[in-house]
Amino acid sequence: MADAAGHLLDHHEAGSTWVGKSIPRVEDASLLSGRGRFIDDLGVRPGTLHAAILRSPHAHADIVSIDISAAKQSPGVVAVLTGEDVTSLTTSLVVGVKAPVECWPIAVGRVRYVGEPVAVIVATDRYLAEDAADLIDVQYRPRPVVCDPLAALSPDAPVLHDGFKGNVASDRTFRYGDPEQAFASAAHRISIDIRYPRNSCTPIETYGVVADYDAGEDAYDVLSNFQGPFSIHAVLSRALRVPGNRLRLRTPPDSGGSFGVKQGVFPYIVLIAAAARAADRPVKWIEDRLEHLTASVSATNRATTLSAAVSDDGRILALDWDQVEDCGAHLRAPEPATLYRMHGNLTGAYDIRHLKVRNRVVVTNKTPTGLNRGFGGPQVYFALERLVQRIAVELNLDPLDVIRRNLVAAGAFPYRTASGALLDSGDYQEAIRRGVVEGGLAALKARRDAARAQGRLYGIGYTAVVEPSVSNMGYITTVLTPAERRKAGPKNGAQATATISIDPVGSVSVHVSSVPQGQGHRTVLSQVVADVFGLTPSDIRVNTELDTTKDAWSIASGNYASRFAPAVAGTAKLAAERIAQRLACIAASQLNTEVDDIAFVAGHVGSKRNPDNKVSFSRLAGLSHWSPGALPDGVGQTIRETVFWTPPELTAPDDADHINSSLCHGFIFDFCGVEIDRVTLQTRIDRYVTMHDCGTILHPAMVDGQIRGGFAQALGAALYEEFAYAPDGSFLTGTFADYLLPTTMEVPDPLILHMQTPSPFTPLGAKGVGEGNCMSTPVCIANAVADALATKDIDLPLVPAKLADIVRGAEPAPPAGRAADTKRTGDRSLRGEGQATVAASAERVWAMLLDPATLQAVIPGCHHVEKLSDTHFRAEVTLGIGPVKGRYRAEVRLSDLDPPHAVTLGGSAEGGLGFGGGEGRITLAPTASGGTSIHYVYEAAIGGKVASIGGRLLDGAARVIIGQFFASLARQAGGAAPNRSRGSFVAKLRRLFGGGR
Amino acid sequence: MSRLQAGRRHPVRFSLNGKPCTGEAEPRLLLTDFLRHQIGMTGTHVGCEHGVCGACTVSIDGSPARACLTLAAQVDGCEVRTVESLAPSAGRLGILQAAFKRNHALQCGFCTAGILMSLDCLLRDHPRPDEATIRDFLSGHLCRCTGYAPIIRAALEAAAEMAGDVSRETTHA
Amino acid sequence: MKPAAFDYVRAETLDEALEVLRQEGSDARIIAGGQSLMAMLNMRLARPRTLIDIMRLPELARIDAKGDTIVVGAGVRQAALLAWPELGRSLQLVALALPWTGHAQTRSRGTVCGSIAHADPSAELPLVLQALGGEVHLRSAKRRRRVAAREFFAGMMTTVRAEDELIEAVSFPAAQQRCAFREVARRHGDFAIVAAAAVQTAAGVRLAVGGVADMPVARDFPRLEGSALDEALNAFAYELDARDDVHATARYRRDLVRLIGRDLVREVLP
């Protein structure tokens, strides 16, 4: 009986398993009919309130004051919480490194990134909550900003947290083998510097939280589209100051995509739970898209210098990694995990025995980072695979030969990498061989040659990638020193859970704590369990909602690190087999045969030797309910079985910092042909081939779906998507009109190839497959573009404008008499100049500039001017263009007075749509006709909401408004209309607010 | 002239999925919120509220439209159709829905309702669109899961089936 | 991300709409298709006191061919103009450019006049109006006037429409000359980084460029070839005072003006 599981597989002979077939998904019918149950589709308790969040327009500033009095009086408002309220109700979120640093879900005294929550408004509906948010008056005192990770290391950089030395949250070095010797003796040292940008997988459904607090039991009940890992539950209950069993965390039946991102909802769980406690009512918050893009979570950006010791024939003898990881303004759990997820895999698919690593983690004034599909893989492989391409170029070798020459040998598995990963299985050489043949590389090369012969910019890129899956819950402790780890106790493993239940009529239910967001887990589990019981998938009902109060779960629960197929589905198989084993004993007893003779076939359990000797599955399966006394002795119940499975290979890091960071390692070989259009400089993917070995394939269509989806996101990362920040920390891509996801017009269909080398470490032989193309594709495209343009420096995303200098060299000079455009790239300050001629004398104009009454009349949209001193004014103004209008509080200071010839105006304005500051020099010169010519130059910067969502229009808007000021001045001084400046200035400015519908 | 005052609810009478429907809405209430939270039709999803992602696309008087860029008050007297109208009966799927299921043209299903409504409008007006037409038409939708290829395949298959090139029994859900 | 409160006026006659505009001026906004305005309302970039819906006015929903002029009323949706059977014959340039305006799902609601009133410097319809030398028909409670496209656009999202005026219609000269249109955006359907239209003229060609300056700019060129054409285009490119943003650099925009401009000129002056 002990090995009954083996016999259960007998009926799978003749290829009759459900696993491996692309059956229709059980999830689809409701999703296609509008009957999905996403968090915002579910009803809430009567009386549930709705939250809106007021967020910081500044990247770094002290909060001088917050006036919530008007907001509290606003219709429908029940509660308004600020940082002080939240700190009184909760405890700081734990930080993943040893440092005296706090991490709150809301700004406390100081804001450190654009979009950081500053207040939570709870009202009877969302519209009213947003109305009240508009009434909160926050005074900020801006601080210097640091956005660049390398700049953050500088000793004179502004410091974000006093508890981190400088801005460095962690600085560790690692040494494996003898890298110094390898570099000293190698023929070549080849290096590359990489800046990997910020991006995110931006699910189409945003975050949602519904929280309730029961004061009688001091317990929270939270529904959220959180995706795990449920190690975060411990972070949450600690932050909410309750034991874990008093935080009931539930997930809705459906979740609209995550790709890691919905891990980042957890600070909002604390925030909304605190709001529910303060309001003494259930509170619901659905994040909007502006909030999501600005402030949900981002993948890390990273600055990497990677060097290789290389022999003449392209053999890589050692690597030297120097990585500076930018985790944004707070180090939120589980960061700095992005940096350590790949620690065992820093040698990629290659057999490289000597390795040196320096890992630094810095904080900057940007949105905190967290899980995102690929999680550390894109950053690592972009450096490693760009370097491999550079080795080929510099040594004049074929890049594919360099890849082949360095691969882990086919007979070497399981293979222990220099830094400790145990590569479970594979045959990389064979995968490449098949990829080259089946993917048509020879034809692609001919296509490239033909294109180049016509003068077209065409290139081919390659990449070979090991895709890790099923994360070791202990890998993150590699950030600690061995001594710190010893003190904290070992962390390891990755518990997966599955529960199989059989009801009194013998129908089978499955529950897992995998929390899917569209991956089709319910379908695959129905296949896996149907195979064990000899049933059809439609006989099996699967539930993937998670309720931490009632369900089996552990810290590794959730949907991340591509763990479903290798870990969760396998665990469901183990649970089903345990029950099947008992059912086989019962059946053997009833059918008077041996357990070995029992098979589960077509809804029956019967004798293999005598197929007529059988009992229906449902009847047999119900016996534990109806007649437990009649079961054979010692068999036990068949009602419910929960299996916890953790792979023994996932051990804690050792004292030499070796870490098997993941259980499984799939292999990907990609190549592509791209063409860069000579006019538009857009990169077009001509052909993309992606060869995958993800072990045993459970559902081919879903595997291909994961590959295609990952490919599309990776294409976005390569060509379109970036969370862009200005040097002052302004966030520039706050809408889907500026953060560009690829559409049907941009995404080609890649050729997907497979081979299957089962993993010896997982119950089903499956490995993860969901993240690989996010690791392989960006660098594959980059390598192809580097090949097409014969260039070394490729910065993602490949915005066409970035290629202009490479492809075209210097720009044609401007026509004679016109200065060249001297603007620095990336300089976002708005500059302009203009001129107006008025009939009045210079003395009169001068007096007007210093007179509050005149200023009130000429400042566009001015409601009120207050004179604080002879040279300092305060004004309330409404500014805008077209339909866009906002009210601002402005301060104006005059300096460098040279009456009546020149004056400098410096000013700042702050309001609901953002803030601005600038300086202008006005010079007055008499005209021949007795009037005055007013000339002005200005430089201004604008930040906040309007920079995030309207950056495209800002420059022109500023010109309109500044021009309007001088037009009014001219009008007030009885002058003529201002002259147009440089052909683009604005005529008839008093009609400023006209136009539009 | 009718002036609907801010802060008050006003009746909105329209046709929803072929049946008369009356609700009440403040002037500023978005059609998305109106359909989902007043009428209770939650199949229409909200993804961006600035008209880019397409998740909220519904049919207004036969044309695909962004419900997030439409006020409830604007559809007074209009014919609105949502994803809930596509299935011929409970437990069955229409031709387009069935093609999506066969082709694994959805994963999380959040963007799907909008895409289905756009295609439903397209196929009513243009029975045999080619792939380029479909890609162009769907470029106003964002899907983050599928990479689009299965969606295009499903649309082409559904178009062929509707045009009578292929016949399938109505697919059971 | 919900709009601030406003009154909503469903105008049943044009006079009603004009009367509300007369009384409320810039506190009121006309809403037609709403495809630009609604996003601004949702983001609370715009917070008018009153919205005036003009889409129930049948007299505005007309496309009329009056002699050599095509008059498109304020209620005409972009999709309706695109589906107008005469479009390809009478307004070839509009037929070329309209498919680039947004997506099918926004053209179905958005109006031709609304796009022109919004005066986004990257939008196609203002560019085409400028290229063809069309007119904007403005109307207030007190008066009617027509403004030539070159006078109408005054800057970034700024026009000479007075606060009490609405656009009743726009008119395009029905033209048989050769014309061409090209647009470059990051993705299909995005706001143009550069959009350009060329129309043959008696003396040569008119080239209009959007997406670069604060408004679409048209320039007449004599018939030029070779380096003379390149120099003229280079001068034009610099005059547009291009700027950097997250999607493109000023240099890239000038490059496109030079390269696309040359292609378009050659296309209409073979």
Image (tube, helix red, strand yellow):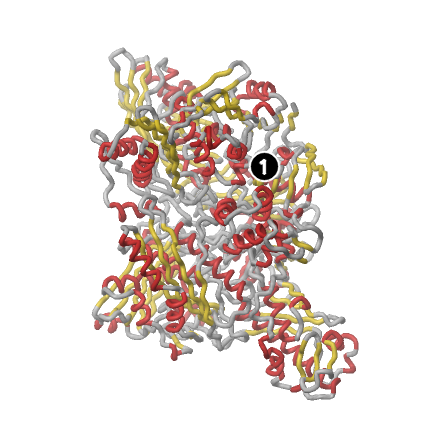
Judge whether B19 appears above or below A758 on screen.
above
Is A846 in front, or is C236? C236
Q: Residue drawn at (57%, 50%), measured in percent from left and top?
A: B159
Label 1: which residue? B70
Q: Is residue A168 visible?
A: no
Is A693 in front, or is C154? A693
Apparent side of residue A194 relative to residue B164 in the rendered image (left or right): left
Q: Position of residue A251 (x, y in %)?
A: 61, 58
Number of on-image labels: 1
Is A855 in front, or is A581? A581
Q: Is residue A782 visible?
A: yes
- Judge the density around disc 1: few (<14), some (14-19), many (≥20) Cα neighbours within 10 Å: many
Of the 4 image quadrants, the one containing the N terminus of chain A is bottom right
Is A145 in front, or is A788? A788
Corner quadrant of residue A309: bottom left
Q: Position of residue A843 (x, y in %)?
A: 30, 15
Q: Residue drawn at (38%, 64%), measured in percent from left and top?
A: A440
Q: Please report, as a chain letter, where disc 1 is located.
A: B
Corner quadrant of residue A575: bottom right
Judge whether B129 appears above or below A491 on screen.
above
Judged from the image, the secondary structure of the residue bearing numbered disc 1 is loop
Q: Residue drawn at (56%, 43%), measured in percent from left and top?
A: B126
Q: Position of residue B110 (x, y in %)?
A: 57, 52
> Farthest residue in the top direction?
A929
Q: Position of residue A989 (x, y in %)?
A: 41, 22
Judge whether A827 appears above or below A662 on screen.
above
Corner quadrant of residue A227: bottom right
Amino acid marked by disc 1 = Thr
Judge whether A874 appears above or below A93 on screen.
above
